Amino acid sequence: MKLLVTGGAGYIGSHTCVELIQSGYDVCVVDSLVNSSEEALRRVSSITGKTVPLYVEDVRNQQALEEIMRKEGVQSVLHFAGLKAVGESVQIPMEYWSANVAGTLSLLNAMREVGCKSIVFSSSATVYGDPSSVPIPETADLSTTNPYGRTKLVVEGMLQDLVDSDPDWSATLLRYFNPVGAHDSGTIGEDPQGIPNNLAPYITQVAIGRREVLSVFGDDYPTPDGTGVRDYIHVVDLALGHVAAVSKMGTTPGCHVFNLGTGKGASVLELVAAFERASGKSIPTQITDRRPGDIATCYADPSKAKNELNWEATRGIDRMAEDSWRWQQSNPMGYGDERG
């Protein structure tokens, strides 16, 4: 099966390309390279022994997408492309609506034009807002606290409406929790541009000496150590969840929703401790005020994915920290000057 991976040069997309190729799928990538690196795909090729065709294009260019899908004979799409920083989405909401919502609309229109009616969508646990209880099942009430989350929720509704209108469509919505880690080779990993928005790369950049101290936003939450608790999932487990979704999608049309998480929560300080064990370094922290919109505790009920996709996360936070640290040590400046 020929798969198009939008955003395939990014963090989760590149790791998913590796697992798809190693599972026997043919992959091509569309990526604007705005927040990603062509070098990541060169390294995907070195890991897998397969060249990955890259089209440097924005998903909002419907005509270009149609031409690519026809040329490559694409049968299904995995859609990662988009903007993803919660804080930034509050500052520049219209860019998020354009990239995430208009971009998906363009992609779906292109897919419809070429007769490709199968998609796996990169959604997010942010669609659960501040959950009333944990663990969170897929049937929990949906709400959002920021523009990024709203764009994900709107796209989920768009896909549901599309499937309702045409039973030939298959859409799988994967609600991620908090990806951490890197490929165990240490050759691909998370390489944010500028100041990291995610916790793990900030920790590793402090450990490697690129940053002086980790700010911990609040230590007065109703959690065991007062810091926020999240469901951290190894990026390779997350990538394998996509492989399972693609396999399942071929047999079950309709719209399907799955949480991808471990079902366990870890606090910020617990994650820091795991990175200290992995790196053998003390990671300085400073407690600062809570961030607006942050919640105390959020972790998944992943039982539906286990039952229906035969998938579950197997790597714990120590493995996440070890693999992240291996990546950071091998690539202290990320992809550095080799960025595309």
Image (cartoon, rainbow, N blue to C red):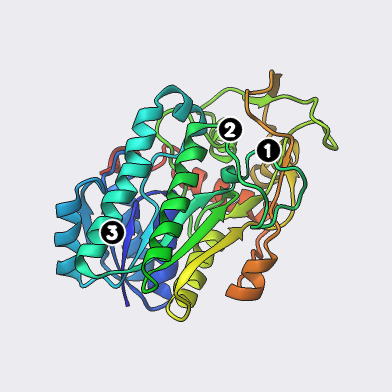
Name the residue beneath numbered marker 2.
Answer: 145
CB under 8 Å between discs 1 and 2: yes
Q: Amino acid at mark 3?
A: Val
CB under 8 Å between discs 3 and 2: no
User: Left of 181 or right of it: where is 263?
Assistant: right
Q: Amino acid at mark 2?
A: Thr
User: Left of 216 or right of it: where is 110?
Assistant: left
Number of disc labels? 3
Q: In the rendered image, which quarter is residue 15 located in?
A: bottom left
Name the residue beneath numbered marker 3.
Answer: 29
Give the farthest residue toward the top.
Answer: 289
Q: In the rendered image, which quarter is residue 275 located in?
A: top right
Give the farthest residue toward the right.
Answer: 224
Q: Quadrant of the N terminus?
A: bottom left
Q: Earlier in the sequence, mark 1 or mark 3?
A: 3
Q: Amino acid at mark 1?
A: Asp
Nearer the viewer's eye, disc 3 or disc 2? Answer: 2
In the picture shown, does residue 284 fall above or below 124?
A: above
Say which element carries label 1: loop
Q: CA distance from mark 1 to mark 3?
A: 34 Å
Whether residue 235 is visible here, answered yes or no, is: no
Q: CA distance from mark 1 to mark 2?
A: 8 Å
